[in-house]
Image: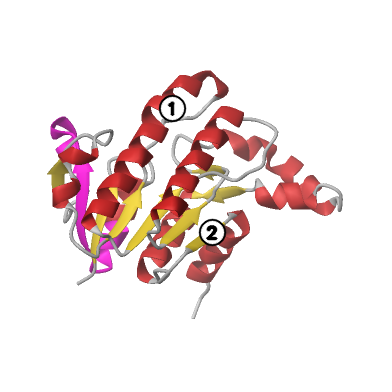
Amino acid sequence: MTEVFVTGGTGYIGRPLIARLVASGYSVRALTRAASQGRLPAGAEPVTGDALDGLTFRDAIPRAATFIHLVGTAHPSPAKAAQFRSVDLASIEAAVSAASYARVAHFIYVSVAHPAPVMRAYIAVRLQGEALLRHSGIPATIVRPWYVLGPGHRWPYLVMPIYALLRWNPSSRALALRLGLVRLEDMVTTLLQAAGNPTAAGVRVVDVPGILAAGRVARRPF
């Protein structure tokens, strides 16, 4: 049975992802604070620790496991630049250190689409996370969504007609595709596929078109 270690498992993406992993037959350990254990989906083994301190959970990571890092500031905005460094950057630093110690076989990191005209502090921190991962030498998949639509995250539906116009304009098509909107179920499917098809070496990047393609394939009738 493939073993997976998840950080951020009680969050927006983490909960549905863990449910899918368990349903697909994976053995899942999920890092959580003691007070949040009850929010983990059934079937996941809780690991109590601090996502900002790899020493608190590195010994609980199974050898040769797949590590999925989902910790990050909720509802990112330009006003949260300090949190991006204190939470997002600190957590990926801790995760890469712990994963290296445990000699994981594959690391999956949710980054962000770039370049983009806004959210520079957020993108800068995620780029630092990507650099840490590349420098570690751990085989990795980096997933780069821009905005993930789902429960409580639906306001961008209002601007979808603008995205459609941008995609039709040759001068803005590349930007619209790179910064397109993806659905929560498409993100979960992409992460599940990455877990099931690890890269043996180097770093694989899945951008917005790749996330959308994974979702379309999953919904295709047989």
* Residue depicted at 61% across the width and 37% down the height: 156
Q: Position of residue 217 (x, y in %)?
A: 53, 70
Q: Amino acid at mark 2?
A: Val
Q: Is residue 6 left or right of residue 89?
A: left
Q: Quadrant of the N terminus?
A: bottom left
Q: Is residue 97 shown in magenta?
A: no
**In this view of the protein, which residue sits in the foreground, 154 or 106?**
106
Q: Position of residue 48 (x, y in %)?
A: 14, 39
Tell me the magenta residue range: 19-40
Could you say which disc has been placed on residue 101 in the image?
Answer: none
Q: Is the residue marked by circle 2 packed among few (<14), some (14-19), or many (20+) residues within 10 Å?
A: few
Residue positioned most to the right: 170
Crowd class of label 1 (few under 14; some 14 to 19; many from 20; radius 10 Å): some
Residue 31 falls inside the magenta stretch: yes
User: What residue is shown at x 17% (from left), y 43% (from top)?
Assistant: 57
- As helix, strand or loop, the secondary structure at mark 2 comes to strand
